[in-house]
Image (tube, grey):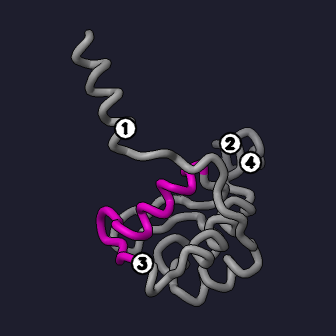
Amino acid sequence: MRRCLIFAALALALAGPALADPPAGDAARGKRVYLADGCYECHGRVGQGGAFLGPTPSLAATELPYDAFLQQLRQPVNNMPAYVAAVLPEAQAADIYAYLKSLPGRPAPDALPAALTH
C-alpha cells in the first residue's frame, strides 16, 4: 500500500502542474483554424468523430482538460499528425479548444425521436 502511494505521488510530481483554467480562446477563430488546418477531415466538421483511418474520437463538447488536449496536439497517439508550436501556435490551439467546447456534443439517447430507438 505504501509503495502505491509513493508511486502515485511520484507520478503527480513528474506530471507537472495541471492548468487550472485553459487559456482564453476565441471559438469563432477556432472554427476557422479547425477547418483550415484540416482537423475536420478526421474529426468531422462539427467534431462529431469519424472513420477516416479507423475510428476517430468525437471532440464536440470535449471534456478533455486543455493540457491533455495540447499534449495530444503536440505528441499525438495513433495516426494523428503532430502539430508542433511552429505549425500551430498555442493561441490557435486555445482557439480550437474554445471552438470544440462550444459545440453541443452528442444528444442524449432519450432525446432521439422514437422512430430511431427501435
Nearer to us: label 3 or label 2: 3
In the image, the segment drawn in magenta is 63-82
Q: Helix, strand, or loop for circle 2?
A: helix
- Give the residue type that dot 4 points to: Leu
Nearer to us: label 2 or label 1: 1
Disc on the earlier residue, 4 or 3: 3
Residue at the disc numbered 4: 112
Residue at the disc numbered 3: 83
Identify the image quadrant of residue 22.
Answer: bottom right
Instruction: Write the residue at 51% across / 85% down.
Output: 38
| Neighbourhood count class around disc 2 (C-alpha, 10 Å): few under 14, some 14–19, many 20 upward | few
Residue at the disc numbered 1: 13
Q: Is residue 83 above or below residue 5?
A: below
The residue most toward the left is 3
Q: Nearer the viewer, residue 84 or 57?
A: 84
Separation (CA) of disc 3 from disc 1: 26 Å
| Neighbourhood count class around disc 3 (C-alpha, 10 Å): few under 14, some 14–19, many 20 upward | some
**25 inside magenta stretch:** no
The residue most toward the bottom is 36
> Contact (CB < 8 A) between labels 2 and 4?
yes
Q: Is residue 10 above or below residue 36?
A: above
Separation (CA) of disc 4 from disc 1: 44 Å
Question: Taking 11 as reference, is 88 left or right?
Answer: right
- Give the residue type that dot 3 points to: Tyr
- Give the residue type that dot 1 points to: Ala
Nearer to us: label 4 or label 3: 3
Q: Helix, strand, or loop for circle 1?
A: helix
Residue at the disc numbered 2: 109
Q: Helix, strand, or loop for circle 4?
A: loop
